[in-house]
Image (cartoon, grey):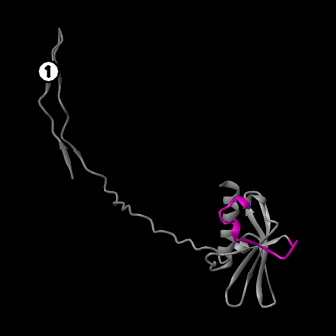
Amino acid sequence: MTTLIRPSNPILIKPDSQVVVVRPSSVMQIVPNAAPAVRIAPARTATIRPPDRGAWDERGWTKRHARGLEIYEGGYQVGTRRFTGRIEVERRGQISAFIHNPPKEIRRHRHRACFQQVGIGTGWFRLHWSRSPQNVDEAILYFERVLDESFNG
């Protein structure tokens, strides 16, 4: 779009001794810049895929096979505290999670009755599931949540 500015009538200024006439110059034409138009659109979203490693591997747990079981050993982590743990996966997928010498705070948790002592004097306790986890990662994360709730309410 082009805009035209046209001169108007001259303005006369009359001081005491002389007359000054102020008038606009010739027609001024303003033309928009001929730069190409810039299209602004949302950027494409990036898909972030989780690593191929499981949470058990990320947390430094080890995996081995014995007596037809997959055995995972490592530490449940709550803040700066670590507790020795073990998870066993049977061939049919049944998952059992254990903790060695659980903290006394676990007695205040609503699931305290779900901890079953394994053997006499071994220090190992098994967590009885109301709903069995689908995988080892889920078992570790659930166990850590129970521990966290025991400490932090």
Q: Residue furthest right?
A: 121
* Horizontal side of residue 79 vs 27, given as left or right: right
Q: Residue furthest left?
A: 9
Q: Position of residue 101 (x, y in %)?
A: 82, 66
Where is 36 relative to 11, above or below? below
Task: Place residue 131 in its image quadrant.
Answer: bottom right
- What element does badge 1 sit on? strand
Asked whether 82 or 29 is in front, the reply is 82
Where is 11 relative to 90, above or below? above
Asked whether 52 or 25 is in front, the reply is 52
Q: Position of residue 34 (x, y in %)?
A: 31, 56
* Horizontal side of residue 128 vs 82, given as left or right: left
Where is 26 relative to 107, above or below? above
Asked whether 49 or 142 is in front, the reply is 142
Q: Position of residue 150 (x, y in %)?
A: 69, 59
Q: Position of residue 14 (x, y in %)?
A: 15, 14
* Horizontal side of residue 66 vs 58, given as left or right: right
Where is 17 relative to 57, above or below? above
Which residue sits at x=18%, y=12%? 15
Q: Is residue 98 visible?
A: yes
Q: Is residue 54 visible?
A: no
The magenta stretch spans which residues?
107-122
Q: Is residue 15 magenta?
A: no
Task: Place residue 29 in its image quadrant.
Answer: top left
Q: Amino acid at mark 1?
A: Leu
List the residue tagged with mark 1. 12
Which residue sits at x=69%, y=81%? 95
Q: Residue furthest top?
A: 16
Which residue sits at x=25%, y=50%? 31
Asked whether 23 or 65 is in front, the reply is 65
